[in-house]
């Protein structure tokens, strides 16, 4: 737009434009035409008209930062510059404050108690009200209508009694706590309060400096009288959040959010919802009417009144990656609804300080209702309260009820009015001292120790909502807004799909209305990329089959002095691989540091080095050492590879694309057994070549991966975690939408990923912090599934067959080396075929049915193998031997179809983005421990108890079936972020099955529409 800054105006010229139809004013040396802004000014017309035609710098600075002009005024409204001799742009910062008129007279001010002698917040409030100007008093102290809610906010605390404990060491007391992952010195924060300069010239900077003294949280008001950068610069030790009012002019709000994104000290966004329309604060309205004779009360309100759960939170998630806190929750139903949106990390119970709706419930009432009707809210989001805090005992009572922290608004402003920064410090000091005194007398040393046992709220029971919880109604209301089209309903348009809230139903709707072509160029490139990553799986398959096959070669066993039937040394050669896995798993966190592809590269490079050592081994210790290096490095690559695939594969095909990864275990197994067979057949008479050549071949596949992996894109979720959103979006559009950056699928996944990621920069301490695995009920449920499935995948009877098949075959009468090797090859081929089919069936049938069904089948097979092995061992029954071989192969086929595709995939699916790398380390540790137990004990058990070892696994697998049915969650067809909602449910298993049914209905509708 055109700027008129070359034009200069005198004050006399500006003065000609002094009424509502033609309103100009000078601010900081610039002349503005604000005529169009007069009728929509959030503070009413009076203040603008009073300054019309004048230099309004002093009046403007008393309540606003200069940056607010950038938000509301377009450059076309800048008429030019004020002549220098008339400008007050360079006036001292305090000059505006000199115009303040105090309510109290000189006698009142002279009798004020010195600050250091003030002992309570009520005392400070009384003194401040005598000192503040009438304008400030009318704005700060007023409440709506009869001010019943404003008074009740504080009075309700008097009805809660404390329950002290004795014989508790209370010499120390620590008030420090965590708020949304930020360490703060007090469980007390300063709530957003507008126009702090009305209280003191230092305004919000004085509050920031005081909060810095205590390392306290300050929520900066959207209507602060000082710019945000200036405020955060005043308090280096404070933690900051920013209050958002969504204006009717959305573009203005987006401009402000863009400015906030550039301020790293702002740690989260507080969306204010408790004042969509102004209450009638009579004292404030009366003062504004008095400012201009004959004026009517201002009826203008600048905030958007049409905010909704779905639309607003989706829009806000596109504007910021910071955690979102909802301020103004006033009923338990809305608190419960907030937990349904992953971008919402906290809520503040508030009724706008009694300034909105009179007789609305106090924050404490709402907190009690949450405890009564939906206590799970306290585990899912951080709950804070704002309103009514006047004593340290009030703070303690709120914390005991489950609040994470409490806010003070007016109290901070009153302290500011009395002595600027020092006054706010005195306010916080009094509250902190009173809180510590109350905690000591209760017998509590830390904030985290406070709980419902320390209070009695019996007197308040009659004040609580006496209806039904209504959570099912909330679910239906949200479901109606978020639901994808079901049977007999029309398809949604693309515009409607894009407007839906991120959820499994939304994903299903997109796939039903605008499914990307899975044979498009982006998908074909993804398949090629994945096929190279699959080679990482060959390392494990090659090793397991290689050592099992080599173990049957006389040249190998004689070279290292190992008996053909196996002993402890044989077990150590095999089990050292599991030890290396467990050690390598400790370093999976590095993939969170430098990325998934680098971890794969270094892992494959280490495998090549380990191969060289094992191939050149001249002694058993050297062989064991080389296998340790190989397994350590293989774990790095083998763990990061499925992590990478799970994070880059589209949800609709994740089970197939990522599931195929582990099927290449059998490709490696086939290559290993075939190479051993060929070398034994043709090179057995040439020294040690028949077992050394297969060892050298171990470096072929990892070598290929090393050469190309760094040409691949990084995981989009890792990029989002590193705040590299544009790169992540480019990858998603290329591989998930065939290059369409505006595809709704790309938009959905980006919003889900951004909402699920922690906005804090990752530190070295975070890399080693394992608390994320156990910090909440949902996290503990997730890691339970990760650990149990990892164990089941290695301890279901499969390892004793894959590693010791030649020994088992000898146990049932097959003693020919050639026959044993051929059967080993056949076993691997059967495993690959069924695993490949199973990877697709997991995306068709679902994870639960496949896993439960395959475990049942494995149990039956092992029972038959045990019976047949007993028949051959005890009675030399040849038929039993043959049947046993058939069911050994059938067991392998069933295990391959059910478990093999999911072994590295399901443990990665069931954990959250921030847990994934660390939990995959847990997966490898668990799998390594189970594998070590199996491979070390296996030969000993087979030698000593024979078929009874199979009987043990019959019983164990039966227990696995029961556990899977009761606890395993269905993940088919959902994005990784959508699974977050599943695990936040009271019963994740039931919730996953409910969503699965919805997705199935969408598929039926899609099929029916296609048929029509």
Image (tube, grey):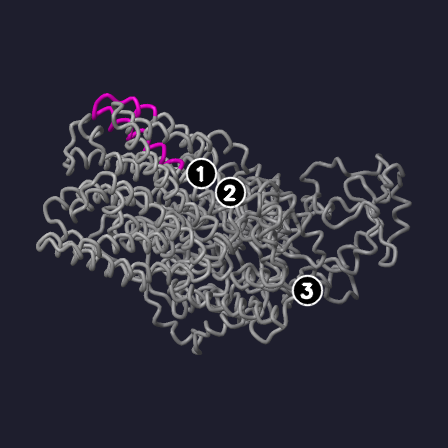
Q: Residue shown at 20%/34% (left/top)?
A: 572
C-alpha gap between disc 2 and disc 1: 9 Å
In magenta segment, residue 518: no
Residue under numbered circle 1: 592
Q: Quadrant of the N terminus?
A: top right
Instruction: Indicate the position of residue 747 as horizontal and vertical percent values.
Output: 61, 53
Neighbourhood count class around disc 2 (C-alpha, 10 Å): few under 14, some 14–19, many 20 upward = many
Residue under numbered circle 3: 285
Q: Which mark is residue 721?
A: 2
Neighbourhood count class around disc 1 (C-alpha, 10 Å): few under 14, some 14–19, many 20 upward = many
Q: Earlier in the sequence, mark 2 or mark 1?
A: 1
Neighbourhood count class around disc 3 (C-alpha, 10 Å): few under 14, some 14–19, many 20 upward = some
Between 802 and 753, the one lying in front of the other is 802
Secondary structure, mark 3, is helix
Q: Which residues are magenta?
A: 612-637
C-alpha gap between disc 2 and disc 3: 48 Å
Whether pointer 2 and pointer 1 mark residues with C-beta atoms closer than 8 Å, the reply is yes
Q: Is residue 737 visible?
A: yes
Establish if 561 lies above or below 901: above
């Amino acid at each position: 737009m055109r700027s008129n800054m070359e034009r200069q105006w005198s004050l006399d010229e500006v003065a000609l434009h002094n009424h509502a139809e033609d309103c100009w004013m000078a601010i900081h040396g610039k002349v503005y035409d604000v005529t169009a802004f007069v009728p929509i000014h959030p503070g009413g017309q009076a203040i603008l008209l009073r300054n019309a035609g004048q230099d309004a710098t002093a009046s403007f600075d008393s309540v606003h930062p200069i940056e607010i002009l950038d938000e509301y005024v377009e450059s076309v409204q800048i008429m030019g510059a004020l002549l220098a001799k008339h400008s007050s742009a360079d006036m001292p910062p305090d000059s505006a404050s000199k115009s303040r008129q105090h309510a109290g007279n000189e006698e009142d001010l002279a009798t004020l108690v010195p600050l250091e002698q003030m002992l309570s917040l009520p005392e400070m409030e009384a003194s401040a009200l005598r000192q503040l100007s009438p304008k400030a008093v009318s704005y700060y102290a007023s409440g709506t209508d009869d001010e019943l809610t404003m008074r009740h906010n504080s009075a309700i605390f008097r009805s809660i009694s404390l329950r002290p404990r004795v014989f508790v060491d209370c010499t120390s007391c620590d008030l420090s706590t965590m708020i949304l992952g930020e360490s703060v010195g007090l469980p007390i924060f300063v709530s957003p309060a507008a126009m702090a300069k009305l209280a003191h010239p230092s305004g919000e900077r004085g509050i920031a400096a005081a909060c810095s003294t205590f390392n306290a949280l300050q929520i900066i008001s959207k209507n602060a009288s000082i710019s945000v950068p200036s405020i955060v610069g005043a308090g280096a030790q404070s933690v900051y959040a920013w209050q958002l009012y969504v204006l009717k002019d959305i573009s203005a709000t987006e401009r402000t959010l863009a400015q906030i994104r550039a301020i790293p000290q702002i740690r989260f966004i507080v969306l204010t919802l408790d004042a969509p329309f102004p209450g009638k604060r009579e004292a404030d309205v009366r003062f504004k009417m008095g400012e201009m004779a004959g004026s009517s009360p201002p009826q203008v309100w600048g905030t958007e009144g049409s905010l909704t759960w779905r639309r607003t939170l989706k829009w806000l998630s596109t504007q910021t990656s910071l955690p979102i806190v909802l301020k103004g929750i006033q009923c338990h139903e809305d608190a419960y609804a907030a937990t349904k949106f992953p971008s919402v990390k906290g809520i503040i119970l508030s009724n706008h300080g009694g300034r909105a709706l009179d007789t609305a419930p106090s924050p404490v009432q709402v907190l009690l209702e949450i405890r009564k009707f939906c206590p799970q809210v306290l585990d899912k989001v951080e709950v804070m309260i704002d309103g009514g805090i006047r004593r340290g005992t009030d703070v303690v009572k709120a914390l005991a009820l489950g609040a994470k922290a409490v806010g003070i608004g007016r109290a901070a402003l009153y302290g500011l009015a009395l002595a600027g920064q020092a006054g706010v410090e005195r306010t916080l000091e009094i509250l902190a001292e009173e809180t510590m005194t109350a905690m000591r007398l209760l017998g509590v040393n830390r904030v985290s120790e406070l709980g419902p046992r320390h209070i009695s709220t019996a007197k308040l029971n009659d004040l609580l909502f006496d209806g039904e919880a209504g959570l099912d109604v909330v679910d239906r209301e949200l479901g109606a807004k978020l639901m994808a089209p079901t049977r007999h309903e029309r398809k949604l348009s693309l515009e409607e799909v894009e407007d839906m809230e991120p959820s499994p139903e939304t994903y299903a709707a997109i796939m039903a209305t605008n499914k990307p072509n899975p044979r498009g160029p982006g998908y074909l490139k993804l398949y090629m990329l994945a096929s190279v990553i699959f080679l990482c799986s060959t390392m494990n398959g090659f090793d397991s089959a290689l050592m099992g096959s080599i173990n049957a070669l006389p040249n190998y066993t004689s070279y290292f002095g190992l008996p053909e039937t196996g002993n402890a040394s044989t077990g150590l050669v095999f089990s050292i691989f599991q030890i290396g896995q467990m050690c390598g798993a400790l370093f999976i966190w590095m993939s969170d540091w430098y990325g998934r592809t680098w971890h794969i590269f270094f892992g494959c490079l280490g495998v090549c080095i380990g191969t060289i050592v094992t191939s050149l081994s001249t002694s058993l210790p050297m062989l064991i050492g080389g296998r340790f290096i190989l397994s350590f490095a293989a774990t790095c690559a083998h763990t990061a590879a499925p992590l990478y695939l799970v994070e880059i594969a589209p949800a609709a095909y994740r089970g197939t694309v990522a599931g195929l990864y582990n099927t290449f275990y059998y490709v490696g197994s086939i290559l290993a057994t075939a190479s051993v067979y060929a070398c034994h057949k043709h090179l057995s008479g040439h020294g040690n070549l028949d077992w050394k050549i297969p060892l050298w071949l171990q470096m072929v596949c990892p070598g290929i991966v090393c050469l190309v992996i760094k040409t691949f894109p990084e995981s989009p979720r890792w990029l989002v975690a590193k705040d590299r959103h544009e790169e992540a979006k480019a990858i998603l559009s290329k591989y998930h939408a065939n290059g369409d950056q505006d595809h709704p699928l790309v938009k959905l996944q980006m919003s889900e990923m951004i909402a699920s990621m922690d906005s804090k920069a990752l530190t070295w301490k975070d890399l080693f912090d394992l608390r994320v695995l156990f910090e909440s009920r949902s996290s503990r449920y997730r890691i339970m599934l990760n650990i149990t499935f990892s164990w089941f995948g290695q301890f279901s009877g499969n390892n004793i067959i894959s590693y010791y098949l030649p020994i088992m075959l000898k146990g049932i009468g097959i003693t020919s080396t050639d026959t044993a090797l051929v059967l080993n090859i056949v076993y691997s081929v059967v495993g690959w075929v069924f695993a490949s089919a199973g990877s697709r069936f997991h995306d068709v049938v679902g994870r639960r049915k496949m896993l439960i069904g395959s475990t049942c089948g494995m149990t039956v097979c092992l029972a038959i193998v045990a019976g047949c092995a007993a028949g051959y061992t005890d009675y030399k029954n040849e038929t039993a031997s043959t049947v046993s071989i058939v069911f050994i192969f059938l067991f392998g086929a069933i295990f391959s179809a059910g478990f093999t595709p999911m072994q590295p995939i399901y443990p990665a699916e069931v954990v959250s983005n921030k847990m994934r790398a660390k939990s995959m380390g847990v997966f490898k540790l668990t799998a390594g421990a189970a594998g070590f137990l199996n491979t070390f004990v296996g030969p000993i058990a087979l030698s000593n108890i024979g078929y009874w070892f199979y009987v043990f696994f019959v019983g164990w697998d039966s227990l696995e079936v029961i556990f899977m049915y009761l606890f395993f969650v269905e993940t088919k067809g959902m994005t990784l972020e959508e699974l977050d909602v599943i695990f936040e449910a009271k019963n994740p298993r039931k919730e996953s099955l409910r969503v699965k049914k919805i997705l199935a209905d969408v598929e039926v509708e899609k099929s029916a529409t296609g048929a029509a």
